[in-house]
Image (tube, rainbow, N blue to C red):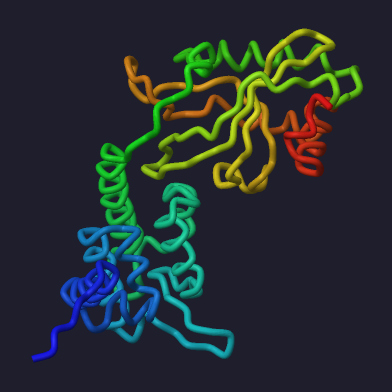
Amino acid sequence: MRKFILTEDDKNYILGLYNSKVILSEGGLSKFFGGTVDDIIRNYGDDAARTLDDVFAKIYSKSSNIVSKAEGTFIVSASGAEVPITTIQSVIKLVGEGKVQANEVLKYLPRNLADGTEFRSVLQQAMEKKGVQKAAQASVISLKPNPSWIYKWFSTDKSKMIGNLFEKIKKLENIPFNPKNVKIINSDVLDSIEGGMLKQRPSLEIQVAETGDNFLIYSSTGTGAPELKQAGDWQLLAGWMPDLKDSKEIQWYLKDEATTQLTKGLNNWATELDKFIKKYGVDALGK
């Protein structure tokens, strides 16, 4: 008898198909998301996916919960409001991918369906389960060792570090940006865990000749505040914080909306620094 050898990818694909069938009902997530349901299971985990499957099965079990129009299909709330299915699909997808937080979007969804079925709280429950799962995953994520130079920028005092950054950058407000006067002292691609997800960001320690001050800058992933910045923006950074008091792993980048605005016109020197690096690259600094 001829033997077939399965690769690991083949095995995972087959198991994925099997798990989807075990987890999902006929009229729940699979009907709501169609062919993209495997991504939902992967992003949320089995327990959260079952919770989502239950609520969407209830949506389709009562015709009063759904209305179809020329412009698409809508879910009907207990108050009579109609929410496009595409909106709910987007919310679940974005939260699952870690691009938005649940509390930022859940308030826009119905509390109850037209037949009285709880909706918002069930979604919240699923998203909280997803959060627990991601946190557990984060505990086993392997981070590469931090380079030694970052530890002088390590602190648990966020306000002090951000205050220091603003004191130094203020000195450069009326000084024209000159890339020849910016020296790269240290550089690396640094790992951090945020929202249970591993993120890697190119980071530099630079020294500015005009004031003699050192600054940290990093290349943003664009996911933290997409309305303020985009992937590839070079932002000023106050430092790093460990997740736990005695941890030696980078977990949090010391930044906020104000530090982001520094390279968006709040500080002319910092804004020109960002523009220069995006146009010419970091290797052009100091030349």
Q: Is residue 191 above or below residue 90?
A: above
Q: Position of residue 2 (x, y in %)?
A: 13, 89
In-front residue for pair 256/104: 256
Q: Position of residue 149 (x, y in %)?
A: 53, 16
Report the residue at 32% width, 62% height from top.
42
Please identify the quadrant where the C terminus is shown.
top right
Report the residue at 72% width, 16% height from top.
207
**64 lies left or right of 104:** left
| Quarter of image, res 80 | bottom left
**17 lies left or right of 283:** left
Q: Position of residue 201 (x, y in %)?
A: 55, 38
Report the residue at 26% width, 64% height from top.
49
Q: Is residue 223 above or below residue 155?
A: below
Callout count: 0
In-front residue for pair 11/1: 1
**43 lies left or right of 67:** left
| Quarter of image, res 178 | top right
Report the residue at 31% width, 58% height from top.
44
Q: Position of residue 111 (x, y in %)?
A: 37, 60
The residue sitting at the left extreme is 1
Q: Is residue 88 above or below residue 218?
A: below
Q: Is residue 175 above or below residue 200?
A: above
